[in-house]
Image (spheres, rainbow, N blue to C red):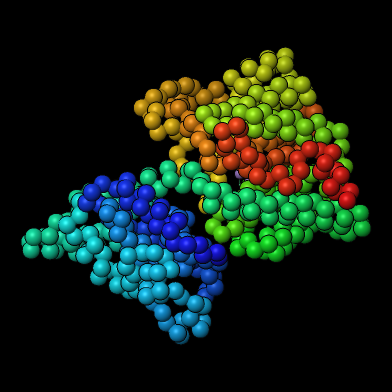
Amino acid sequence: MTQTTPSLYAKRRAQLAAQLRAGSVAIMPTAPERARNRDSDFPYRHDSYFFYLTGFTEPNAWLVLDANGRSTLFCQPKDLEREIWDGYRLGPDAAVTALGVNAAYSVSELDQQLPKLLENQQTVWYPFATHKGLETRVDGWLNAVRARVRFGAQCPAQQRDVCGPLDDMRLVKDAYEQDIMRRASAISAGAHVRAMQTCARMLRAGQDVREYHLDAELLHEFRTHGSQFPAYTSIVAAGANACVLHYRADAAPVRAGELVLIDAGCELDGYASDITRTFPANGQFTGPQRDLYNLVLASQDAAVAATRVGARFTDPHEATVKVLAQGLLDLGLLNPNHHGNAQDVIDKRAYFPFYMHRTSHWLGMDVHDCGSYVESSELGQTSERKDPLSGESIVSRPSRILREGMVLTIEPGLYVRPADKVPEAFWNIGIRIEDDAIVTKEGCDLITRGVPVIASEIEALMRA
Ligand code: GLY
Ligand code: MN
Ligand code: MN
């Protein structure tokens, strides 16, 4: 993984330290290694918060930061034998310069040093409910401080969740982060192009195409361009499988005449991309497929137009639903005699059987990135309404106001399962179109358009 100058991370640590109250210490562990089976581990992936503050990707590491900005790293010690088996370790001595921290120790000294770092402080910050067993370890360190109270030591009396300030910081991506996200998006777009073209070429050659063939093309393109992993498990869904929202690439045959939905994005240097495209397996949309596809695309256009500085996070979703509601009536998937007009469809959520997810989520280091979806300055303003489908009462708060540098997905879809009163021509069609958008002053920058979305452009690409 790319190592950058430590100054970027030092700046973030200083920003976080400035938000901790005087007399505070923040503790941030990285992610644990996880066993897959017997003595094989899952590929290691650092913790995003820890990486955001250190740029350090080794396991068994902790950052401790106090409100004065003093940072202490605990990491794996140099160990020739372990390094022969598992690879290079930075080690505490080199970490001070390489990561720009004030001090570094072997992780074996954590239990010895932490009580010293916590002594005479008032507040301990750590990530709540994210690292199994962390609360117990904090309890242990606090108890070690308490054991010294009779000698005059002060024990922190308050505990706070460090994810709060970090979530707000991570929500707005700086130029460095945006650059990585653009590169991740370009790789992922290339992977979608490759999968589309391979699909059409194999079918033209009369080959048996399976979902896993297309998954292999995605992985090839990701790794060829330096991505470390897929950012999430790729969805490659042929035909009716596209109506299963969390379908995984499996072994189903990909047949001419059916659509294929691929939701896949790579992770590059710690940042995710997230793209969905839906395309005809043989490169030619049928009439009903095209009608539905163009409706989803029009709804995405409306959402893109609603994404800009000052808009609310929910505005793109509302714009999407408006277009979909009218389109479902126009195409006969909803009957106006029964459902009324588009506003009625929205009010009664009658579109829900065809569009059951939200249009956007934050994107960043995590594919469903951190960050509150509520505007923090308006937290107290609650409103209550009844959900028209479940009858449950829902309390909502004003949605987040979009700011320059926030990154979100825009991913409308329609999923048509066989049902009475739904024209058979649309049965088993599942369509989603997903792009990643950086919010700008003028609107938003779609960073994933290296793979086309317009139906005729997809057809041209697949003929090539
Ligand atoms: N690929 C995950 C999502 O679109 O939310
Ligand atoms: Mn997404
Ligand atoms: Mn996705």
The residue closer to the viewer here, 189 or 12, is 12
Q: Is residue 125 visible?
A: yes
Residue 118: where, in percent of width, then height?
22, 59
- Label total for image: 0
Q: Residue at x 37, y 49 (%)?
A: 15
Q: From the viewer's perspective, tell me whether residue 355 is left or right of residue 108.
A: right
Point out residue 285 in the picture as x, y percentages from the top left corner: 85, 39
- In this view, the residue in front, 67 or 349, is 67
- Depicted 184 relative to depicted 45: above or below: above
Look at the image and tell me in which quarter the N terminus lies: bottom right
Residue 106: x and y in percent read: 34, 74
Coordinates of residue 401 in the picture (x, y in percent): 49, 31
**Could you say which quadrant of the image residue 268 lies in?**
bottom right
Question: Of 376 and 66, which appears nearest the observer?
Answer: 66
Residue 240 visible in the displayed image: no
Is residue 300 placed above or below 157 in the rendered structure? above
Residue at (77%, 32%) from the top-left corner? 294
In the image, residue 416 above or below residue 235: above
Which residue appears at 27% of the width and 52% of the height? 67
Query: Residue at (46%, 59%) from the top-left corner?
Result: 51
Of residues 50 and 37, which is closer to you in this image? 50
Q: Residue furthest bottom?
A: 81
